[in-house]
Amino acid sequence: MRYLFACLVTVGLLVGTASLALSDNYLKNADFKEGSQMWHGDGQAAFLKPDGTEGSDGDPGAIPVLRVALSESQTRSIYQEFQPQDAPGKVHFSVDVYASLDFKRSKRAEDYQTEDFAGMPIADFMIRYLPNYFQQTAPLKPGKWVTIKATFGGATFGGQESSDDRAVYFMVAPGTGVIYIKNPSAIPQG
C-alpha cells in the first residue's frame, strides 16, 4: 500500500511540475494550434507527419509546426516578442527543429556575417535573444528532430531592465530545404 501511495504522489508531483513549467512559458501559441498567430517572420503554419512529410490536420500522427523555407542567399527566421511579468535572473530556451532531407546550408562565405551581432554566424541554426544579442548556434541533422537549448542571463543592454520587452528569434542559415519548428519555450529561472 505504501508503494502505491508513493507512486501516486510521485506521478502527481511530476504532472504538477510539468503543467507548472508549461504555464511559465513566456511564449504564446507554442503548440501552434492557432497556426502562426503570435509568431512573426518567415514561418508558415503546417502539419508534419511522422515520416517527415507535410500533411494536414486530419492525417494520423500529424502535428502542428511552423515551416520555414530556406533562401539561397538570406537568413530566415521566426520570432516572438514577449514581456516578462517578473525580472528573471535567467531565461531557458528550448526548441525542436526538423530539417528536411534536402536541407543544405550555404557554403558561400558572403552569406554570413561574423563580424557583428546583426548577421548570421556560420552555423545551421541559431537561437537569438534580444535586446541582449545573446545567441546559441547548433548543427541540424537532415531527416531528424534536434532539440536546441540555451540559457541566457538577465543582463541589461542599453539600459533596459530585465522586465522590459524581449524577443526570441529562431534563425536558419541561407541554403536549400525546409526546417520545421515545434515546442518552442522560454522559461524563467531564478
Image: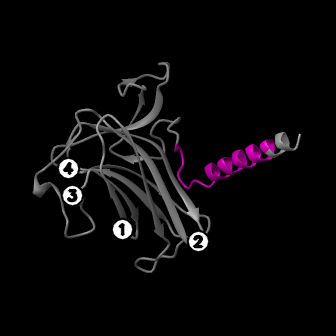
The span from disc 4 to disc 2 (Cα, nearest Å) is 34 Å
Q: Nearer the viewer, residue 144 or 83?
A: 144
Residue 114, numbered label: none
The secondary element bearing badge 1 is classed as loop
- Percent position of residue 37, x then y: 48, 41
User: Residue placed at 41% from the left, 63% from the top?
Assistant: 129
Query: Residue 109, relative to residue 76: is it above or below?
Result: below
Callouts 1 and 2 close, C-beta under 8 Å: no
Q: How many marks?
A: 4
Residue drawn where x is 36% and y is 63% of the image: 135
* Labels 2 and 3 touching (C-beta < 8 A): no
Is there a contact, CB below 8 Å, between mark 1 and mark 3?
A: no
Q: Are marks 1 and 4 in contact (CB under 8 Å)?
A: no
The amino acid beneath tag 2 is: Ala
Q: Earlier in the sequence, mark 4 or mark 3?
A: 4
Does the magenta portion include 9? yes
Q: Which residue is mark 4?
A: 74
Question: Could you say which is closer to the camera, residue 107 or residue 117?
Answer: 107
Q: Which residue is mark 2?
A: 87
Q: Which residues are magenta?
A: 7-30
Name which of mark 4 and mark 2 comes first in the sequence. Answer: 4
Label 4 close to label 2 by CB (< 8 Å) = no
Which amino acid lies under the numbered mark 1 shown in the image of this protein?
Tyr
Q: What residue occupies the far top of the structure in this picture?
A: 59
Q: Amino acid at mark 4?
A: Gln
Quickly name the residue at label 3: 122
